[in-house]
Image (spheres, rainbow, N blue to C red):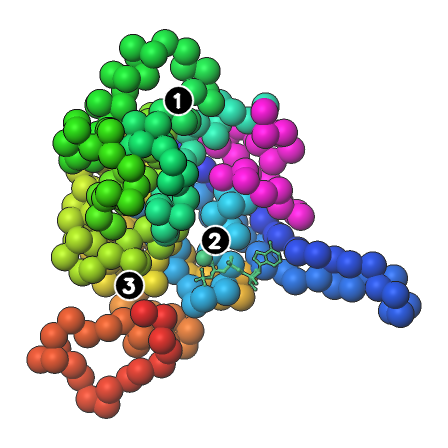
Amino acid sequence: MKVLEAIGLSKVYNPRHSWLGRSGREPGLTAIDGVSLSIAPGENAALIGESGSGKSTLARLLLGLEKPTFGRVRYRGIDYTDLRMKDMRGIRSKLQMVFQNSYAAFNPMFTVAQIIDEPLRNYDCDSVEMRTQRIREVLEQVGLAASTAHKYPHELSGGQLQRVGIGRALALRPELIVCDEPFSSLDVTIRKQMVTLLQELKDQLGLSYLFISHDLSLVQRFCDSVTVLQRGRIAERYSSVHLLKHSSHPYTRQLLAAVPIQHPAQRKTPLQVQSNHY
Ligand SMILES: Nc1ncnc2c1ncn2[C@@H]1O[C@H](COP(=O)(O)OP(=O)(O)OP(=O)(O)O)[C@@H](O)[C@H]1O
Ligand SMILES: [Mg+2]
């Protein structure tokens, strides 16, 4: 059974009542337009697309952080589209997120232990001993020393902060983690270490990922399937990410052409610079 399924999802922002229009309603902005996709257990699904194509909006709809205007979302066959936040706590604990900028996402007054403890407290894990034990386990899983628990966000490097972000996402033992541009603020070497960490966690814990990234070289290394989003719609979907490079879709070709070349020797002429996503 699929971990996650989206069926005909649409999100229209701000369909305002018009003062002058005869129709009485302005159309609003369609950020997501009829998107259907599914993620299998253990799948590393990639979601790519230019800036503004709707990737983060789709992620929020899938996690139930926002309600779709149309369409349904299901976790292991359970439809949670219409559930209120408090009624979908069980499902939310299984679907977690790692943010692009952990520093901004964390409370600067909290220690690492408090940051990881927050979801545990919110989800009714009452025993202090069990929570302390879980924090210790999670720090070990993400490769941080136990002493990191007492540090504050400003005392950590970018890579360590993202490890805390992943640890926090792991605390409630999720099945799927959505990573929205998780490593874009990190340098290339640290990015590679983080991808290795995500892969190890997947192998240990049987996780699935939805990996949103502009870094197509990372996507091609890390992901199984790939969905290409263009102006809120699915332009293409491949069950194997390796097929992406054979795409004849002009939009996908443009995204691929924007991948930075790691070494000048790999550069083909003419040099194609299509956009500045990086
Ligand atoms: N809360 C909102 N209210 C109104 N419009 C929104 C809202 N959130 C997103 N949008 C619009 O929806 C569209 C898709 O935005 P979204 O942030 O999902 O794109 P994205 O693919 O994640 O872009 P990026 O790669 O820059 O992060 C954009 O036009 C954006 O301005
Ligand atoms: Mg985004």
- Position of 1 relative to 153 (above/below): above
**Foreground label between 2 and 3:** 2
Residue drawn at 25 percent across, 50 percent down: 158
Q: Which numbered disc, 3 or 1, marks the residue closer to the eye?
A: 1
Q: Is residue 200 above or below residue 8?
A: above
Q: Which residue is mark 1?
A: 120
In the rendering, which numbered label is found on residue 133?
none
Would residue 179 appear left or right of 68 to someone viewing this image? left
Look at the image and say whether residue 81 sits in the magenta stretch: yes
Q: Residue 245, image x and y in percent?
A: 27, 68
Query: Residue 225: image x %, image y %?
Result: 32, 52
Could you tell me if residue 2 is visible in this image?
Answer: no
Circles 2 and 3: CB atoms closer than 8 Å: no
- 21 lies above or below 194: below
Residue 68 appears in the picture as rendered: yes
What residue appears at the point 58 percent right and 49 percent down from the top-left corner?
A: 9
**Which mark is first along the chain, 2 or 1?**
2
Which quarter shows the N terminus?
A: top left
Q: Quadrant of residue 153?
A: top left
Residue bearing the label numbered 2: 56
Mark 2 Cβ inside 8 Å of ligand 2: yes
Where in the figure is residue 112, as x and y percent of width and height?
29, 32
Crowd around label 1: few <14 · some 14–19 · many ≥20 (10 Å): many
Amino acid type, label 2: Ser
Q: CA distance from mark 2 to mark 3?
A: 17 Å
Residue range highlighted in magenta: 63-86
